[in-house]
């Protein structure tokens, strides 16, 4: 017995990973619908052994499914998620649209699983920003042990975080730069090949970007509003995998060995931390993997109780598709996913 599931945005970076992961974790799917825009009607996507033809969002009857994995951007989510939730299925949304809505739980299963219990207010659950998802998995156990006072983060975010157009732009510019000269930027504001861009999203009045503000807002909603967090988000010429240099100041003492053991025993984390020239993780090695990886755990001697870490995850997996499917698994385990009688 399985669920009827619709993946909206099935032709995109995140949507395709959703299809892969549903199959990899053997989520109980009775019937899968791949949904995209009108231009993709009939486009084929793979779901395990099956080839599925995409259907048009505008024509689809969402009252016939139990679960909608929504990954088609903020505009589509704003227009559709509430309506779909009202028609019956639970929507797990990847955009930023609903994350700070007080009637929508924002969930990372390793961090705040119990929040799925009040998803029935709108039948929507929000997935966090990709950079937040991996950060909170590492911060939560440390906060429970030694109460975090302040966090300073610099992100190194891959181009796949900007969708398939972002990946195409890095690929084309890199290929062309020595032949025709780099192709002019379109998706990113400046050349991304052989470069880094200290700007993601749009500027706010205070000089931070909305991408940066998402990180502290989401950490406050999921872990603790008392945590002070400041961040610089940077786009780097990496295809998949976000990295973060994280500096943490605690209220209570915690040494690096204890932190390493604690993180090793915490859900969703793998610690790779040897002090030799290959004893740390890079985004290339995290690509295609489920966990969040932590390396370079060390004392920060400039404050009373401080640690620095390096945190890496596959942004299309833990940062998006995997987290959404882990939420679906949680709903399934708790009996919170309705199963409609098959028509
Ligand atoms: N990439 C990440 O690391 C990441 C992480 C967290 C959250 N997210 C969020 O996940 C969402 C998708 O990201 P992505 O990276 O997968 O983007 P993407 O590769 O650009 O894919 C966008 C998807 O949305 C569909 N779509 C666009 N306009 C549509 C419309 N009018 N009606 C129906 N479907 C439409 C596209 O279908 P067509 O092919 O038919 O246009 C495509 O399937 C965004 O909200 C993004 O912010 C992404």
Image: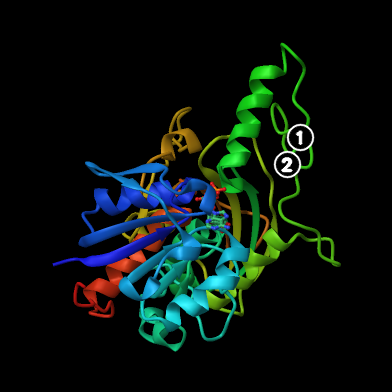
Dot 2: what SS? loop
Q: Residue 87's quadrant in the figure?
A: bottom left
Residue lying at 68% horizontally and 59% vertically, measured from the top left: 211
Mark seen at residue 185: 1
Instruction: Identify whether 64 is placed above or below 20.
Output: below
* Residue 339 percent location from the top left of the image: 23, 76
The answer to whether mark 2 and mark 1 are in CB contact below 8 A is: yes
Relative side of 87 to 71, left or right:
left
Quadrant of the image containing the N terminus: bottom left
Relative side of 311 to 22, left or right:
right
Mark seen at residue 134: none
Residue situated furthest top in the rendering: 179
Read off the residue under disc 2: 188
Residue lying at 58% horizontally and 59% vertically, measured from the top left: 73
Quadrant of the image containing the C terminus: bottom left
Gap between marks 2 and 1 measured at Cα: 6 Å
* Residue 130 percent location from the top left of the image: 53, 56
The crowding category of the residue bearing disc 2, from other C-alpha atoms within 10 Å (few below 14, some 14 to 19, many at least 20), is some
Instruction: Identify whether 129 is placed above or below 298.
Output: below
Q: Is residue 86 visible?
A: yes
Relative side of 45 to 208, left or right:
left
């Amino acid at each position: 017995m399985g669920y009827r599931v619709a993946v909206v945005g099935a032709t995109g970076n995140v949507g395709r990973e959703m299809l892969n992961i549903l199959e990899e974790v053997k989520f109980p799917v009775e019937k899968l619908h791949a949904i995209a825009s009108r231009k993709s009607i009939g486009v084929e996507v793979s779901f395990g052994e099956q080839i599925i033809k995409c259907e048009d969002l505008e024509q689809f009857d969402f009252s016939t499914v139990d679960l909608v994995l929504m990954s088609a951007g903020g505009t589509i989510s704003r227009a559709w998620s509430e309506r779909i939730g009202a028609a019956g299925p639970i929507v797990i949304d990847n955009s930023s649209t609903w994350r700070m809505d007080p009637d929508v739980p924002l969930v990372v299963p390793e961090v705040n699983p119990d929040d799925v219990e009040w998803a029935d207010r709108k039948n929507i659950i929000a997935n966090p920003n990709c950079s937040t998802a991996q950060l909170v998995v590492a911060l939560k156990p440390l906060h429970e042990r030694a109460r975090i006072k302040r966090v300073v983060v610099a992100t190194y975010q891959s181009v796949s975080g900007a969708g398939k157009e972002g990946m195409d732009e890095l690929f084309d510019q890199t290929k062309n730069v020595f032949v025709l000269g780099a192709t002019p930027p379109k998706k990113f504001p400046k050349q991304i090949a052989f470069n880094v861009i200290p700007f993601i999203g749009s500027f706010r009045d205070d000089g931070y970007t909305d991408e940066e503000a998402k990180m502290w807002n989401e950490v406050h909603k999921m872990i603790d509003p008392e945590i002070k967090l400041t961040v610089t988000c940077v786009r780097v010429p990496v295809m998949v995998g976000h990295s973060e240099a994280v500096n943490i100041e605690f209220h209570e003492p915690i040494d690096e060995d204890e932190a390493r053991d604690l993180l090793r025993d915490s859900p969703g984390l793998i610690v790779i931390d040897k002090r030799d020239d290959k004893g740390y993780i890079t985004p290339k090695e995290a690509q295609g993997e489920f966990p969040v990886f932590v390396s370079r755990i060390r004392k920060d001697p400039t404050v009373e109780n401080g640690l620095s870490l390096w945190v890496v995850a596959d942004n299309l997996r833990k940062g998006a598709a995997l987290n959404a499917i882990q939420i679906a698994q949680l709903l399934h385990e708790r009996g919170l996913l309705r199963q409609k009688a098959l028509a």
